[in-house]
Image: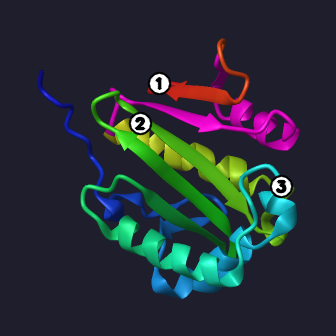
Amino acid sequence: MEELKLEANPQRFQLQTTRLTIRPLADRDRLMYCSLYTDPELMQFIAPVMTMESAQHSFDIAVRLSKQQPFKRLFLALYQHNVAVGMVGLSAVNPTLKQAEIGVLLAKTGRGQGFGQEALDAVCRLFLQLNPEFSLYTDIDPGNAAAQHMVLQVGFKPDSQNDRLFWRKSGN
């Protein structure tokens, strides 16, 4: 069985939307990344809050992974007028299953302004344009109504078997 060829060059994921600059995570994003993963309010629906030391270590790994070609995990920094507002992550990229997971983390300064929706839609569109055979999914805590609303607004559909999963295919 032939494995699907994945278009996963990190440099293809430099985007400009109406309000956001989206680009692969770089060394200059350390403070933003660490502030996201050490924010208890943000992490309540995602994962345990990291210590600053573990967030620093995680950042080093994330930057290294985001430079791999083809990537299996890609972290994209979100900026509005040179101010960090969050991050989009593509992970669990699996050419055999033709699927990948996507998620958004927003800094306090980026919440409630539609940045997550704007970034998520732009990254989904580009990934699915480059990889039309793939499906994207996101795993959302059922208590996170804001995140559920956001993914529904950009064309994700609820999984009929798992209330945490939402899917988007090419053409949505």
Q: Nearer the viewer, mark 3 or mark 1?
A: 3
Check whether the beta carbons of the residues at disc 3 and disc 2 lie within 8 A of each other. no
Mark sitting on residue 44: 3
Look at the image and give the residue range highlighted in magenta. 131-159
Q: Which residue is mark 2?
A: 128
Is residue 3 depicted above or below 63 in this figure? above
Name the quadrant containing residue 35. bottom right
Q: Which residue is mark 1?
A: 171
Earlier residue among tags 1 and 2: 2
Q: Is residue 83 visible?
A: no
Q: Amino acid at mark 1?
A: Gly
* Distance (Cα) linking label 3 and label 1: 32 Å
Please tell me which residue lies in front, 5 or 170: 5
- Indicate the position of residue 46 as horizontal and vertical percent values: 73, 51
Residue shown at the point (83%, 55%) measured from the top left: 44
92 drawn magenta: no
Check whether the beta carbons of the residues at disc 1 and disc 2 lie within 8 A of each other. yes
Image quarter where the C terminus lies is top right
Q: Amino acid at mark 3?
A: Gln
Left or right relative to 20: residue 90: left
* Distance (Cα) linking label 3 and label 2: 29 Å
Q: Is residue 28 visible?
A: yes
139 drawn magenta: yes
- Indicate the position of residue 106 as horizontal and vertical percent values: 74, 62
Left or right relative to 153: residue 69: left
Q: How is the image coloured?
A: rainbow
